[in-house]
Image (spheres, rainbow, N blue to C red):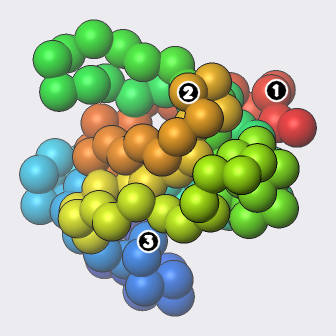
Amino acid sequence: MSPTEFMEITSDAEVRILASLVFSRDGKSDSAVRKAEMIRDLKALMGSDIVHFYYRKTDGTLRGAYGTRDPDLIRERMGDKEDRQRDRPLRTFAYYDIGRNDWRAFRPESIVGIDRKYTV
């Protein structure tokens, strides 16, 4: 699939924005398309599950994280803490980090992989 084809079949506005960033920063290679597909899949999986995934931090180190975007799971984890997503630039992918009990974000082109064997 080409970047153009990916953008034509993707209707989710957030995924389109993040994919555009991947394509502009990583070029229009097969690798960029795979990263855009991982972002799309990660968003879909996190909507109802806890997902184990990896991305490269800005300092170059690899970070494995367990995250979700499921409002019920987030409310359950946060307890009495205020249940709202931290403001973030639209150029990042935000998720609730289960291990740190807080919101985190990463640049979409830094995604490395999703552990598809681990979803809760």
Distance from the alpha carbon under mark 3 to that under mark 1: 23 Å
Left or right: 111 in relation to 48: left
- Tell me if I can see residue 9 in this picture: no
Name the residue at 19% across, 15% down. 60
Residue matched to label 2: 100
Left or right: 87 in relation to 37: left
Image spot of residue 3 (x, y percent) = 31, 67
Distance from the alpha carbon under mark 2 to that under mark 3: 25 Å
Question: Is label 2 or label 3 in front?
Answer: 2
Name the residue at 44% across, 54% down. 94
What amino acid is at disc 3?
A: Val
Label 2 SS: loop
- Residue, far right: 120
Residue matched to label 3: 15
60 w.r.t. 96: above or below: above
Image spot of residue 10 (x, y percent) = 50, 81
What amino acid is at disc 2?
A: Arg
Badge 3: few (under 14), some or many (20 or more) residues near its Cα, within 10 Å? many
Name the residue at 83% across, 62% down. 72
- Residue, far front: 80
40 w.r.t. 105: above or below: below
Left or right: 2 in relation to 44: left
Q: Which mark is residue 117?
A: 1
Mark with earlier residue (2, 3)? 3
Name the residue at 29% across, 36% down. 110
- Tell me if I can see residue 7 in this picture: yes
Front position in the image: 99 or 63 = 99
Label 1 SS: strand
